[in-house]
Amino acid sequence: MLRRSLPRRPEARRILLGTLLSAIGRGLTLPFLFIYLTDVRGLSDPRAGLVIGWYGAVTLALSPLGGTLIDRFGARRVVLPSLLIEAIGTGSLALVDSTASAFGVATVIAIGSSTIWSGQNTILASLTDDDERQRVYGLNFALLNLGIGVGGLTSGAIVDVARPVTFQAIYLLDALSYLTPAVILLTLPHVGHRLAAGAAGAKTGGGGYLTVLRDRPFRRLVIFGLVLTTCGYAQIEVGFTAYAVRVVEVTPRVVAWALAGNTLMIVLSQLLVIRRMEGRSRTGGLAVVGAVFATAWLTLGAAGLIGTGNALVAALGVVACAAIFGFGETMLSPVMPALTNALATDELRGRYNAMSSMIFGISGVIGPVTAGPLIGAADGKVWVAVVVGGCLAASLIALSLRPLLTAIQDGRVPAPAARTPEPTPA
């Protein structure tokens, strides 16, 4: 299954290697930003939530510009400086000592990350054919989470809220990890250039983002993504961590093990899920994702009801929540980017991917800002009810998308395999 999921072009395989190496650094810090800002640097819960929400707001504001720059100059010229900025910002988190400095560092990180996701997806799309793209995006996500899991296990064994230097060390290592995909991209001089230099003017002249927004199926996909990520992904760093630590009363180390369980589920099941989803409705898969995410949050809510009455069972509930959530991710990760790029054209591919990444920016604002107050209400029961209801609503939106897609776009009919052109006689 792994051999079948690998992209045909060696350049794409090297890009995937960069994803794995940088993800290890990301995994060192992913579960602990909220705890680091509050328990180590002394920020209040609302202020820490605002800092993380500010990061999402800046990312959201800059993402449209990133998509335009990718279409105009090529993903390469955008992603390389963004990786450097991201490295500088992430390393600077080790020096945060006040609310003002936290906001400043979050701004720098947001500037870098606002174009990395859409740029890398555009690069992968340019290096893969339609018939393999869904598999490659799924493999990319599996490698991403494998790296995050390795990093999470490592940091979970060394971080200590009583020793700030342990947190400073993981943020510096995370900064170094962002340089590895930059180095790999520098060794591929012909990768990441403008996709449609000749026809871009004709297509983008029709309105750029206005043309993207007129795409009714894509609009529906964006709405689905906003609802799902706000009640799903956006809750991992703040809602999940805060609920587990404050309501279930587990230690940060249990949170790290939960993220490891999430990764283990993804690594063990991703390739099998990719294989099983071939030839099946993508919108049906998205609807199942919403139901799986809702099940994960219900499991976490049950762990909160158990609490300290049975610490072991409560901790297992936290780990089970992350594992169930990971299974949902294995279905979402190949479908969302593949469907986005199935609807996109080369002339506007950067903008389509930027709009898709903006989903995480918008949810990154709403999720962290609302998670704190919701968890504080009724011992977290309000938060559980909101995120469960939101995930189920996303399932209904996904089902409403199916009539707007062709059978090929929905994945029910495989895209024709690309044929290698006949060599031209010298």
Image (cartoon, rainbow, N blue to C red):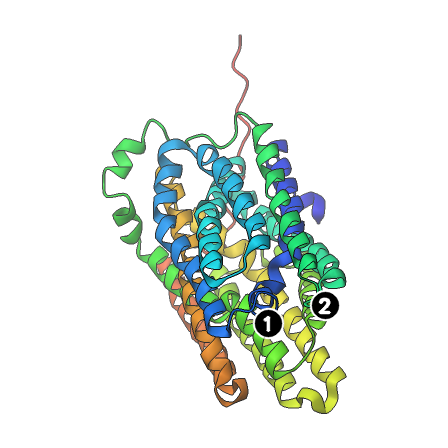
Q: Is residue 88 above or below residue 105?
A: above
Relative depth, front residue between 215 and 373: 373
Relative depth, front residue between 281 and 385: 385
Image quadrant of residue 104?
bottom left
Q: Residue at x 62, y 89 (%)?
A: 305
Q: Residue furthest left?
A: 206
Q: Residue at x 65, y 84 (%)?
A: 303
Q: Residue at x 71, y 43 (%)?
A: 3
Residue 64, image x and y in percent?
A: 35, 48
Q: Secondary structure at mark 2?
A: helix
Q: Which residue is mark 1?
A: 241
Residue 57, image x and y in percent?
A: 39, 59
263 horizontally vs 12: left or right = right
Q: Which residue is mark 2?
A: 257
Q: Is residue 318 above or below residue 118?
A: below
Q: Secondary structure at mark 1?
A: helix
Label 2 CA crowd tier, 10 Å (few <14, some 14–19, many 20+)? many
Three-letter amino acid code at the position of disc 2: Trp
Mark number displayed over residue 333? none
Three-letter amino acid code at the position of disc 1: Thr
Label 1 CA crowd tier, 10 Å (few <14, some 14–19, many 20+)? many
Work out whether mark 1 precedes mark 2 in sequence or the reverse, and give the earlier one. Answer: 1
37 horizontally vs 197: left or right = right
Q: Residue at x 71, y 47 (%)?
A: 2
Image quadrant of residue 404?
bottom left
